[in-house]
Amino acid sequence: MPYFTSQTLDFLRELAANNNREWFRDNRSAYERLVREPALALIEEMGPRLAGISPHFRAVARRTGGSLMRVYRDTRYTRDKTPYKTNIGIHFRHEQGRDIHSPGYYLHIDPWCVFVSVGIWRPDSRTLGRIRERLTERPDAWIGARDDPVFRRFYRLTEPALKRAPRGYRIDHPLIEDLRRKSFNAVTDLGHEDALSPEFPDILCERFHAATPFLRFLCAALDLPM
């Protein structure tokens, strides 16, 4: 049996069209049945599979405070005040991480796309500095991880965010394109047919395995076990 169904996508699509507290309250049982319960079941299934890739990344099947990201949006610093996320977000983060900015595997499902992102998204300045330092001290290790053929078969790195060289680095540094990154993460696209398949855990494991060289480099930069 698949974890998610076309009804899951229909619910998320309807939520996007009716993103208000009254509608969500009236359809809370559908959210539990079509989104939260199957997501928690998938996380539970991924636990031992993830341990086979690395024992240091966690699949925590809890209603709150676990791998499943909360449905409520943080609207404090945005003009968009719609209260709910219209996607399923699951983050299998490193055991020493505390939030979405930790090394990990992120799964995103919405009515329009499905993807996996691996690595570190928008780390703090200290963490980013350590990654850049490792990159310049061990350029061969970085290039080997970045250009690993299995990794690159599935993944593309996100675009650099800085227009100029970061402080302390020359604009003509041979790895300047990588040093300009503010996030060290890579994305692989999936299809809705994957997310609705009973083999979805197997598909995720294949993509997670392919990212091992990339995550190993990042963990080494931060003195984290992999």
Image (cartoon, rainbow, N blue to C red):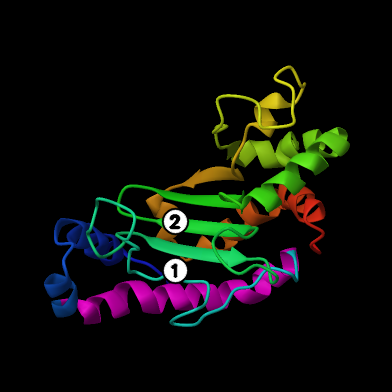
Q: Which residues are magenta?
A: 27-53
Question: Which residue is most to the top?
Answer: 172
User: Residue 131's spot in the image, x, y percent?
Assistant: 74, 45
The tag on residue 157 is none
Viewer-side residue, 11 vs 133 = 133
Check the picture and name the quadrant holding the C terminus. Answer: bottom right
Q: Is residue 99 magenta?
A: no
- Secondary element at image label 2: strand
Mark 1 highlights which residue? 69
User: Residue 189's spot in the image, x, y percent?
Assistant: 49, 44
Q: Is residue 42 magenta?
A: yes
Mark 2 highlights which residue? 108
Q: Which quarter of the figure has residue 103?
A: bottom right
Residue 184 to residue 178: above or below: below
Check the picture and name the quadrant holding the N terminus. Answer: bottom left
Instruction: Please name the residue shown 66% across and 32% down the image.
Output: 166
> In this image, 88 relative to 96: left or right?
left
